Image (cartoon, rainbow, N blue to C red):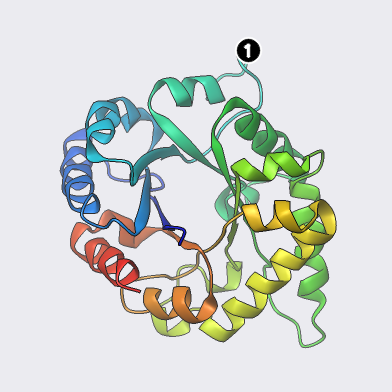
Amino acid sequence: MKKKIIVGNWKMNPETSARAREIFSTISRRAKKFKQLEVVICPPAVYLGLFKKSSAKTGKNFSLGVQDIFWERSGPYTGEISPAMALSLGASFTIVGHSERRARGETDLVVSKKALAAARAGLRAIVCVGERERDAGGAYFEFLKNQIKSSLAGARPRDLRRVLIAYEPLWAIGKSFKEAMKPADVYEMSLFIKKVLTDLFGKDAALAAPILYGGSVNFENAGLIVKEGEVEGLLVGRESLDPENFTKLLRTINGL
């Protein structure tokens, strides 16, 4: 039985390194108890160095990640972080193509370059995809298929061993858990994404790429989304900055 993967995306939070240490210390200490999970925390990159040593001591079920990566190893790219830099600071995952970055102009082509650079450098790339809205005619299926295809352009079947797909429908982000996507709909989209990956890369490669769900997930709806939605993990935003609620979420998924 594969471990469920729970990714905490801190985004541009918290404001101070002291608070970051507090949150990280609590979560990492508690995470090692949940043996059925792989917990990944993606703090702002400036905090990675603070957590490298302690994360290595936490155990095999706890990892660090970065929220974005660049596709070049080095060069005149002000403000960017290379895969090698992330690896040197203890990261083993990177988020790529998050909806908030796409909203600021990041294209599928850019996402594909980042995803492949990360995967081929040894990071596991969490490639975010998702439709902006749903239409009665089902055009969002075609949109999602094209987005996945373009965001993995140039990928080889073996690259998918280091790729995770995070399905985050934009219309469900930032809402209350009651307005989040229903588990049955999550299940439908998970099957669809696996079908798209199978058509592109073959069945074995598709099965190697875990599907995560992100979009208004908290400890109250996480269990049903994972169990009935049949996804292999979650991409969690603001809840991952609350050690108490995040612990409740981890405990729930660990007990499935």
Instruction: Return the residue found at the far top.
Output: 75
Instruction: Return the residue found at the far front.
Output: 1
**Mark 1 residue type:** Pro
Residue 214 vertical position relative to residue 200 in the rendered view, above or below: below
Residue found at x 80% / y 55%: 202
Residue found at x 62% / y 17%: 73
Q: Is residue 182 visible?
A: no
Residue found at x 51% / y 39%: 94
Q: Quadrant of residue 196?
A: bottom right
Q: Is residue 249 visible?
A: yes
Report the front residue among 95 and 36.
36
What is the x, y in percent for residue 218?
A: 35, 71
Residue 47 vertical position relative to residue 223 in the rendered view, above or below: above
What is the x, y in percent for residue 141?
A: 78, 73
Q: Quadrant of residue 63?
A: top left
Q: Quadrant of residue 238?
A: bottom left
Looking at the rendering, in which quadrant would you find the N terminus? bottom left
What is the x, y in percent for residue 210?
A: 57, 57
Element assignment for label 1: loop
